[in-house]
Each structure stands twice: as structure tokens, then as C-alpha cells.
Image (spheres, rainbow, N blue to C red):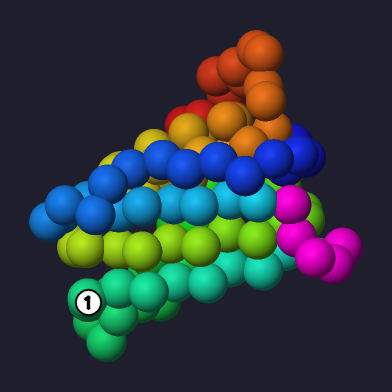
Amino acid sequence: MKIVKEALAGTLESSDLLVKVSPGPGTGLEVVISSEVMQQFGAQIDRVVRDTLARLGVTAGLVVVEDKGALDCAIRARVQTAVMRGAEAKTINWSALS
């Protein structure tokens, strides 16, 4: 998927996260993560975000994650939603959303 516009998903409530996607300034993929639990779970959050982006075929853009202690399933869901909104996807490839 190609991100063509800015999009958001999520909230800044406790145990949730806010994901912002936008077309990147360059050709690559930039992921910026801010989390209250970065020391303990930063590597896992990064892994889940990047894995989800790879499953969706996102290779370029800017992804900003502001985490407030969300579980992996919430991270995946918020990233998927933000990317689909940013890509203006009209159909859903359910097999990529596992």
C-alpha cells in the first residue's frame, strides 16, 4: 500500500496509542516511536509496528506512534487502520490483517 495522505488512528488514553501516517519526505520508511514504556517494551513495539507495515506492503512514508501502554493487538489494529485510511484503501485484503 502507498500512503497518499495524512491519517490518524487511536487515542492518547491509557492503554491505547495514537498512530499518525503521512507520505514521507523521502523514498524510504521512517518510524518514530514515543512510549511511556519504551525502556521495557520499546523493541517489541517497534517489531510489531514494522511487521504490520511489512504485511500491508508499506515501503515508504512517515509513521509516528505515541504509545500509552497498548497491547500488541491494539498496536497492530491502530497501525492497520491508520495505513488503510492514509492509503485511501477501498477494499480490504483480510489475509494481510492477521
The residue nearer to you, when weighing 78 against 6, is: 6
Dot 1 falls on a residue whose secondary structure is loop
Residue stretch rendered in magenta on the structure:
23-27
Where, by quadrant of the figure, is residue 94 drawn?
top right
What type of secondary structure mainly makes up the magenta span? Answer: loop
Residue placed at 33% from the left, 43% from the top?
Answer: 10
Amino acid type for the residue under numbered disc 1: Val
Where, by quadrant of the figure, is residue 91 drawn?
top right
The residue nearer to you, when weighing 75 against 96, is: 75
- Which image quadrant: the N terminus? top right
Residue placed at 21% from the left, 63% from the top?
Answer: 68
Where residue 13 appears, as percent x and y from the top left, is: 16, 52
In the displayed image of the protein, which residue is found farthest to the right? 27
Report the side of 98 relative to 51 (left or right).
left
Residue placed at 37% from the left, 69% from the top?
Answer: 44
Per the image, the residue denoted by label 1 is 37
Where residue 57 appears, as percent x and y from the top left, is: 72, 42
Residue 43 makes an appearance in the image: yes
Q: Name above or below for residue 86 compared with residue 48.
A: above
In the displayed image of the protein, which residue is found farthest to the top? 91
Residue placed at 62% from the left, 44% from the top?
Answer: 6
